[in-house]
Amino acid sequence: MSRIVLTDVGCTRGGRQILSGVSLEVSPGRLLALVGPNGAGKSTLLALMCGDLRLSGGEVRIDDRPLGQWSASDLARVRSVLLQSNDVSFSFTSREVVEMGRNPWTGRPEADEDEEAVTEAMRTADVVHLADRPYSSLSGGERARVSLARVLAQRTPVVLLDEPTAALDLRHQEEVMSVARSLAREGRAVIVVLHDLSLAAAYADEIAVIAEGTLGALGEPAEVLTTEMVRSVYGVDTHLLESPDGHRIVIPLRHHIATQEEHP
């Protein structure tokens, strides 16, 4: 299995410094959650990890090999990516979209696994019933799950997921994060961009807080998710509770609601 290592990573776009000095590592069998406010640089960092954006400084390595030394085809067999945008230009069925995840294996012995990989991925992402539906006719949440199935069908040792729960209902949020957790248990290195701090606490081995383009904190959820950190990074006061299974739950203090109730 593979690991991904970032050393002093930076990114400049349009003359503006988006990220600087970010260093972290995700080993096989680990799930890292990237959290932080809107515009902090989380998605940019993920794009740097997958090679879609050019580094302005530092280095990204997969298997101790700089990202720039990987060919596009080799990179597609070592890492898969779920982006926020799930648009498809042509009128494909959902199953055809999932089958695209097997393209990197065309002409290789692993292509014998195509049918099994696609069927298993669709079952895992709960989209079997959407197989013959045009992708363009699906809701946002359905598209997100079909796109996740495409990533799962690719069967790579490094998996990068950008806000995979954003368009999903409560049940499918939990199912998607359970899938991400299972991938890590299988020995893959998994990086997930999340906004829900409680989801991050429940499923991640480590949390990296991206704030104003830098790495604000990195560590286990119990170490990182403090009232002080949330106030500093998000500007929100919170309660921290512990769930029955021992995970932190982050609840905002809604002062304005209390005020309205006291003064109708």
Image (spheres, grey):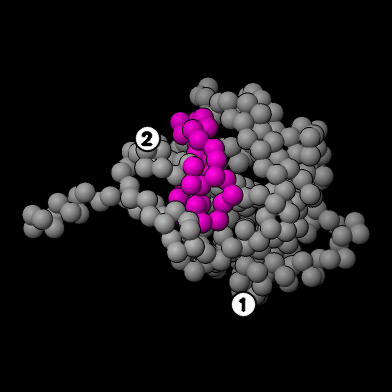
Relative to 6, residue 190 above or below: below
**Horizontal and vertical percent position of residue 200:** 51, 52
Q: Residue at x 70, y 44 (%)?
A: 27
Residue 138 picture location, percent across and down? 54, 67
Residue 76 included in the magenta stretch of the image: no
Label 1: which secondary element: helix
Quarter occupied by residue 111: bottom right
Q: Are marks 2 and 1 in contact (CB under 8 Å)?
A: no
* In the image, residue 221 lies in the stretch drawn in magenta: yes
Q: Residue at x 72, y 48 (%)?
A: 28
Q: Specify whether 107 is left or right of 144.
A: right
Tell me which label, 2 or 1, sits earlier in the chain.
1
Give the amino acid type for the residue marked by disc 1 in the picture.
His
**Relative to the observer, which residue lies in front, 164 or 229?**
229
Which stretch did the figure color magenta? 195-223
Give the residue pinned by disc 2: 232
* Coordinates of residue 29 in the picture (x, y in percent): 70, 51
Can residue 252 be seen in the rendering of this structure?
yes
| Quarter of the figure that contains the C terminus | bottom left
Residue 262: mark: none
- The image quadrant that residue 241 belongs to is bottom left
Q: Amino acid at mark 2?
A: Ser
Mark 1 surroundings: few (<14), some (14-19) or many (≥20) residues within 10 A: few
Q: Which residue is rendered at x = 20% and y = 54% of the image?
A: 257
**Circle 1 residue:** 129
CA separation in Å, label 2 and label 1: 44 Å
Horizontal relation, residue 216 to residue 115: left or right: left
Viewer-proximal residue among 163 and 219: 219
